[in-house]
Image (cartoon, rainbow, N blue to C red):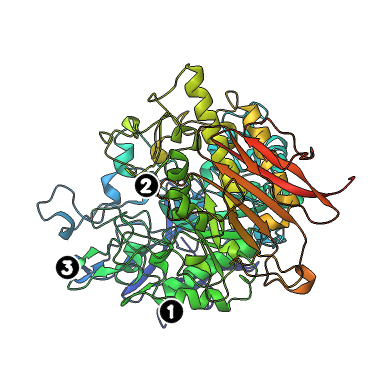
Amino acid sequence: MGHKITSGTPFRMGAHHDGEGVNFAVFSAHATRMDLCLFSPDGRTETARLRLPERTGDVWHGYVPGLATGTLYGYRAHGTYAPERGHRFNANKLLLDPYTRELRGRWINDTATLGYDLTSSAQDLSFDSRDSAAYVPKSVVSDPALFENASPPLRRGWDSALIYEAHVKGLTQQHPDVPEAQRGTYEGLASDAIIEHLQRLGVTAIELLPVHAFLNDGFLLNKGLSNYWGYNTIGFFVPEPRYYGASGLAGFREMVARFHAAGIEVLLDVVYNHTAEGDQRGPTLSFRGLDNASYYRLISGQPRYYVNDTGTGNTLNVAHPHVLRMVMDSLRFWVECMGVDGFRFDLATTLGRELHGFDVGSGFFDALRQDPVLAGIKLIAEPWDIGPGGYRLGEFPPKFAEWNDAYRDTLRRFWRGDAHSAQELGARLLGSAGEFDHGGRRASSSINFIAAHDGFTLADMTRYSKRHNEANLEDNQDGHNANYSDNCGVEGPSDDPEITARRRMRARNMLATLFLSQGTPMLLAGDEMGNSQAGNNNAYCQDNEIAWLDWVAGDAELTDFVAELSALRRDHPALRQTRFLHAALRPADGLPDVAWSDFEGHPLNWRDPGLSSLCVTFRCSAEAIVQERDDDVVFVIFNRGGARAAVVVPEAPVGKRWVYGMDSTGNATRGHPVTTDRIAVTGPSVMALTLAPLGG
C-alpha cells in the first residue's frame, strides 16, 4: 500500500536497485497487462499490486522509488488463456522473474500451481482460478554488493586440463574430514579436505552438476524421491539454495575464490534446453505464464503441445531473440558476477537447433562466438539430444570441446574383450581425429571419459552386467541398456579373490588408458577410489547413500594410482598435445609423430578382428611450431590378453634411455631404468615407458 510507480527503463532485465529505488523490467510479447506483486518479508502476504506502466517493444517496465533491497516480489501476467493457440496466461498464478538472482521460499507440490483444473475432463484446456502465491517461491530484489568483485576466471589452457565431474552434496555429504555443518554445501565443497584431494589428483577443473536453482519433480515427490542431479532448472541466475551453508548465497562466490586460489577452475553443468515447468500438464511458475508461445518451442499446427527434443516435456525456444538474450545474460552473469570459468551445456544440440534443424551457424552459436565476456571461457557441449538428427558428435564450432561418448563406449568394449574394438581404440587414443580434426579444432576438443554421472560408475562397470535401478521405483526400466559392462564372473559384490583381482585390474587398465589418450580427460568423482552405486546406472533421484560418495570404503591404493597417472600425464607433453597426430614425419628427426607396432616391433595387423595387444609411440606433433617442439617420447603397451608376453623395446635416442613410466600391475616402479631390449608384460595390463637422460 502507498507505493508509487513510474515509467522506469527497459534496458536492463530483472529487478535492479540503484540506491533510491528499484527498476523492474520483464519480457512478454503476448501479455495484455503485467502486474508487479510485492510481499511481506516472510513471503506469506501480498502487500501491494502495481501495474507496470510502460511497455517498450516487448519489455514491460516500471520504477518503484524507495523500495529496498531484500523486497520479495513476483509477477502476474494478464492475457489470453487459449492453450490450443499456445497461450496460457493466468493472472491467478504468481510468476518468478526469469532474471531474479535470489529466491525466498520453496515450491510446494500443490495443484494450485497448475494453470488448469486438474479435476476437469477438459484437462489443460480448462482454467484454474486459485491463487498460487502460497505455494511458490518469491523473487528477491538483490543487494548489488552481493555480486561485486567476484574472483576473476583463471582462464587456464586446455593442454593440461583434467576435469573432475562432481555433485556438490554427493562429494561432501559423507566425507569424514569435511566439517559436519559444511557437508552438502558450497562451503563444504571448497573445504580443505576436498581441495587437498583434488590437488593430489592433479585436477585442474571441477565440473559441477547443475547448481542453477531447480525443483523437485512432482512425480518424484509423489514417490518419496527427489531430483538429486538437478536437471530441472527454474532460475538461470540463482545458485541452488539447498546447497547454502552459513554464508548463504555468498558461499558460492567464496567457494569459487577458494578453488581459484588452489589453481582449480569451476565449470558449471547448465541446462538451457528446457525448464522445470514440464509439458502441458506441468505447473505455471514463470516462463509459461509470462509468454508460453515465446519461451517454448510449440508443435507446429498443434501449439497446445510442446516440442520435446529434450525428453523432459518442453524445449526452451533459444532461437527467440529475448530467450537467447536471457541465456547469454545468464552466462555473462555467472562469469562476471560469480567468477566461474566455463560451462558444460546439457543436451547442447537443442541449443543449436533452428526451425530447419541443427545449425552450426545458429543464433546461439553466433552469439557465443562474438561475446567478449565469454572469450577464453571453457565451453563444453553434450553433443546430442533426442530430437531429429540429434546426435552431433564432432559438429560443434571450434570454440567448444565435446563429451565423447564414442570414446567411453570404445574403451569399455576393448577392455571387455569385444572383437574389432582394438581398431576403434586406436582412433580414440589419438583424440578421435575422425570426428574432431577439422575447422581448426584442437585434439583437446575430445572430452574423454570412462564414466559420468549418467550411467555406471567405473567400479560398477566391473561388478554388474545389468543395471539395478529398482530403488528408482520404475520397475528397473529406466537408465541405459548399452552399458558395455562386465561383472567378471559374478553379478554384484564378491569375496572371490580371483574375481576381485580381475575387477581391480580392469579398473586400473581403463584408468590408465584414459590418462594415456590424447584429448581432455574427465574423471567421475569417486572413480579414483572405487566408488559404487550398487549397480544403479541412473541415480538422478537418489539423494542418499546410493549416490553419495563413500569415502570410508574408498580404495586408497587406487587413489594413489590415479594420482600417479595424473602426474605422468602432467610431466609428459607427448600425452597431452593440442594438435592431432597422423604419423607425419617430424622435421627435426624424420620420425613419425605417432607409430603403432606389435609386441615384436613390427607394424600392427589392423585387419585382425581379434587384435588385443598393441603398442603406440607418442612423439611431439610434426605440425608443432618450432618453439613448441619437444623431444618427449612415450611408448605405451596395451595388453588385453591373459598370457605373459615379451615386448621388444624401441631403440632409445642417443644420450637417452628408457625408464618405466607406469605399470597398471604395480610390478614396475616409475623412474626405474629398463635394462633389457625386451620387457615382460602380464595381461591384461597397461605399461608406459618414458625417456630419461643417460646417467640421470
What label sits on residue 134 in the rendered view?
2
Answer whether residue 86 is visible to the viewer in this image.
yes
Residue 216 x/y as whole percent: 39, 43
Contact? badges 1 and 2 (CB < 8 Å): no
- The relative height of residue 628 versus residue 637 in the rendered view (above or below) is below
Q: Which residue is mark 1?
A: 54
Q: Which residue is mark 3?
A: 84
Decide: few, some or many residues near mark 2? Use Cα within 10 Å; few <14, some 14-19, many ≥20. Answer: some
Q: Nearer the viewer, residue 380 or 101?
A: 380
Residue 444 x/y as whole percent: 60, 62
Q: Under tag 1, what secondary structure?
A: strand
Q: Which residue is at the far right?
A: 695
For the C terminus, the quadrant is top right
Residue 105 x/y as whole percent: 46, 45
Q: How many marks?
A: 3
Q: Under tag 2, what secondary structure?
A: helix
Residue 549 x/y as whole percent: 54, 32
Callout in the foreground (3, 2) = 3
Amino acid tagged 2: Ala
Which of the two discs, 3 and 2, labels the residue nearer the N terminus? 3
| Residue in the image at 50% along x and 45% along y | 450
